[in-house]
Image (tube, rainbow, N blue to C red):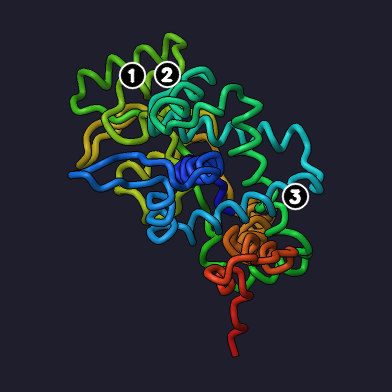
Amino acid sequence: MRKRTIAAIGIACMTILAACNDEGTQDNSQVLVTVEGVDITEGQLIEELKQQGADAILAQLVSDVVIKNAVASADISEEEIEAELEELRSQFQAQFNTTSDEEILELVQTQFNLEEIETMDDFIDEFVLPGLVLQKLGTEGIDVTDEDVQAYYDENSEQFAEQVEASHILVEDEETAEEVLEKLEEGEDFAELAMEYSVDGSAAMGGELGYFGSGQMVEPFEEAAFALEVGEVSDIVESDFGYHIIMKTGFRDSFEDFEEEIRETLINQRTRSQEQVLTDLIDDADIDVKDSQYEDLFAPAPELQ
């Protein structure tokens, strides 16, 4: 299930700008600019804004209301909130190199012009809870049975052959590999050394490669990884990519090993998208459109035959 991402902040910016317009509608005759003797009024500006983007802004404002109502009636635990918050923290760190909540708030306030988000409680209200409630509603009523899981395993047995989970440290020359291996033998942390020395993309994750099966890695690497015991670190392994030091962190080859992953896969396959959940919330909401310009904006989508 895809979670609400920081791209949603852009939508929040648009919503806040739209809300600000409410304050300026009291005197549409106010002159904002005079050009060559011609007055441009606030009413003209607002009308132009309506023509250019009112549908999207109005739809977002309505969406905010129905989502907030859904949040108010949802049963969301503190543990779920913290898990979602950690996901967003990770996204901010990956995209903007933030290392603290204070840096996240500063970024939201300055780069995204959302000065209203002053505390992490504000951040949770705007960016954590909406995603969580849409996710919960998307999985509502889904029941994956043990029989479903077993049937998926039986029908896709080729996906569930022996697999190894491993991390590695990849360097360009043997001398550096020997230096790293010596540090490991002295008790230094594998993940920290991977972040310091490794020259491939796995360095940022402490060298983690996840699970892989036969034929997915180059032969010298695969042979060494499968031969290790779980928790064991290899000697230096040379491949076309450079010099590896491999740590085997897991192994799986039975139904029990894959059971939870299969269950999660089936849940994800049956989960409604957040877009579909939001569409359904809007379809079910009591929306009384007062302006004929927007009478079709919230009409239910026609059912596919």
What number is the disc on residue 69? 3
Q: Which residue is mark 1?
A: 196
Is residue 5 among what the camera can see?
A: no
Location of residue 92 (image quadrant):
top left
Q: Neighbour class for label 1 at 10 Å: few (<14), some, many (≥20)?
A: some
Cα–Cα span, label 3 and label 1: 47 Å
Quarter of the image with the C terminus is bottom right
Please provide percent x and percent y for residue 187.
Answer: 46, 11
Please provide percent x and percent y for residue 288.
Answer: 70, 66
Residue 212 lies left or right of residue 65; in this view the side is: left
Is residue 172 among what the camera can see?
A: yes
Please provide percent x and percent y for residue 293.
Answer: 52, 69
Location of residue 225 (image quadrant):
top left
Kindly state the secondary structure of the residue where label 1 is placed. helix
- Between 210 and 43, the residue placed more toward the observer is 43
- Between 259 and 37, the residue placed more toward the observer is 37
Q: Are marks 2 and 1 in contact (CB under 8 Å)?
A: yes
Residue 245 lies left or right of residue 8; in this view the side is: left
Question: Which residue is located at x 63 percent, y 75 percent?
Answer: 300
Location of residue 149 (image quadrant):
bottom right
Three-letter residue code for mark 1: Glu
Q: Is residue 52 above or below residue 89?
A: below
Q: Is residue 180 above or below residue 259?
A: above
Q: Are marks 3 and 1 in contact (CB under 8 Å)?
A: no
